[in-house]
Structures are given as C-alpha cells and as structure tokens.
Amino acid sequence: MRVAITQLTSTASVEDNYAAVAPLVAAAAAEGARLVAVPECFAYMPPRAGASAAVAEPLDGPLFRRYADLAARHNVWLSLGGFHERDGPDVYNTHAVVAGGDGRLVAAYRKAHLFDIALPDGTAFRESDTISPGHELVAVANTPAGTLGLSTCYDIRFAGMYRALVGAGATTLLIPAAFAVVTGRDHWAVLVRARAIEGGVPVVAAAQVGAHASDAPGNARRCSWGHGLVVDSWGGGGGGYGRPQWSGGGGDPAQRGGAPHAPWS
C-alpha cells in the first residue's frame, strides 16, 4: 500500500493554495498512492493573528468541498490536516479525512493542543486567541492505511495522546504540521520518530515549508521547517524535503503552551 505526503508553502490565497495542492494529489494518485496527506493550513495560511476567522467555514462549505472533490476525482483518500472549520461562533483547526471514490467526509479531529508559546528567537504564537480547542480523540477504521490516528502539529509533543490513539486501535498515525523553523530544526524529526517507536506503528507527517507571506505591518514572515516524513514502526525511513512536492512511501502494516489540554495528554 502506497502513501504519499505533500509539502507546501501555503499563503493567504485560497485559490493559489488549491492550485498547488490539486496537481500534487493528481500526481500521487497516478503513481499509485491510496492515501495522500497534506499539511496543516493547506487551504489557508493566516497572514496575521485572527485572519482565519474571515475564511473559516463548515466542513460542508464550498472550499472544503473542492478538496473533497479531489478525492472523488482521483479515487484516493485524503488526509486534510489543519482546515479552518467554523461551527457557530467557534473556529477550529480541524484535521479531516475524506474517502476516495465519493469524497465523503469520514472523520474530523479538532486540534486539542493549541500552539501558545514564545520561541527562543522572540517569535510568539497564541493560537488559542482565535482557535477553539477540540476535546475528542479520533481514530478512523477501515481505510487503505488501516486505522488512522488523527492529530495535528503541536499535538506531537504530547505522547499520552498517541498512546491513547494506539490503544484505541490506530495502526498508522497522521501528524500534519506547520512546524516553526526554530523548533523544527532540533525537534521535528526526533518527535516524529519517537511517536512511531513508542507506538510501534508508522507515522505519516506532511509539513509546510519555507516563508509564508504576512500582510501585518512590521511583522516578519512566518517560516515553516518542512522536512515531511513517512516513518515506519521502527522509526526508520522517510526523508526531508525543501520545496513543494509530493513524496511516496510504503508503511508497514502494523514548552507546553498555555492552551487547554485534553485529558489524555
């Protein structure tokens, strides 16, 4: 079974982002991928704090539907990690899985551990100022990659969550991310491999890479570390990438922030 990850440099243009994702999904499916994973903020990278509220929509909205239609068109399952989902007054950072063939929404996980932190380089993030935390653990059975344990980016630092996902039957862990450069350089690959080794299951970790545009006066451009990985249950395999692309891999079968933490952290 072939899994593919995409690596993107998403921006605040939903049209440009879709134009980047669509051919990567098509290429991966043409090469035999059964599951394609895209990174956090694939559809929209907020150029400033709070900007996501303007584009957030329900998972039956037109923007999300465009991505679900890709799954139907190419008969490939999609892990859509990090979509700005609106539910009433709340906006969630939601990792959704849609099925190949019909593009139906199979499951949705709302990111529980929000990225509230001041980094050593002085950059500060407070995701919880605009995003509401989720509270549900989500494992998706009967997919081409087995039972998928869903998570997003900063969740990776909370090992208890992954123990709970494996305990709930997950045979593959998905960790889409937009990891900051300053932490990603030292921590990203270590954490991805640790989650695989601890759980004894493969990890599929699609990542944003490079500098994302900012429209906030005086703000430095947000930068993501990249180096998406597909890691087997021994913690081996995978590779690092520095430009937008897709990469295929086979898997074997088998600073806390200030935001609220789930009980299984």
Image (cartoon, rainbow, N blue to C red):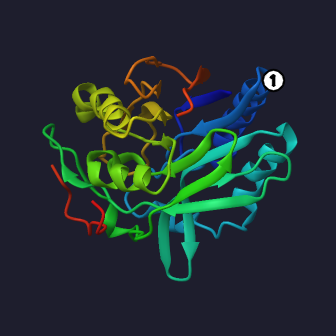
Instruction: Tell me which residue sits at (20%, 57%) in the image.
Output: 257
Above-or-below relation of 52 to 231 = below
Above-or-below relation of 232 to 16 = above
Q: Position of residue 128 (x, y in %)?
A: 32, 66
Instruction: Tell me which residue sits at (47%, 34%) in the image.
Output: 207
Relative to 76, 161 lies left or right? left
Q: Is residue 117 visible?
A: yes
Instruction: Tell me which residue sits at (43%, 42%) in the image.
Output: 177
Question: In which quadrant of the rendered image does the C terminus lie?
Answer: bottom left
Tell how many labels.
1
Q: Position of residue 29 (x, y in %)?
A: 77, 29
Q: Is residue 95 visible?
A: no
Above-or-below relation of 131 to 123 = below
Relative to 192, 142 lies left or right? right
Q: Amino acid at mark 1?
A: Ala
- Front residue of 214/174: it is 174
Quadrant of residue 31 within the rendered picture = top right
Question: In which quadrant of the rendered image does the N terminus lie?
Answer: top right
- Front residue of 132/130: it is 132
Mark 1 closeness class: few <14, some 14–19, many ≥20 residues within 10 Å = few
Q: Determine whether the residue tagged by mark 1 lies in a helix, strand or loop.
A: helix
Q: Position of residue 258 (x, y in %)?
A: 19, 64
Quadrant of residue 84 within the rendered picture = bottom right
Instruction: Tell me which residue sits at (56%, 82%) in the image.
Output: 88
Residue at image mark 1: 30
Q: Position of residue 54 (x, y in %)?
A: 55, 67
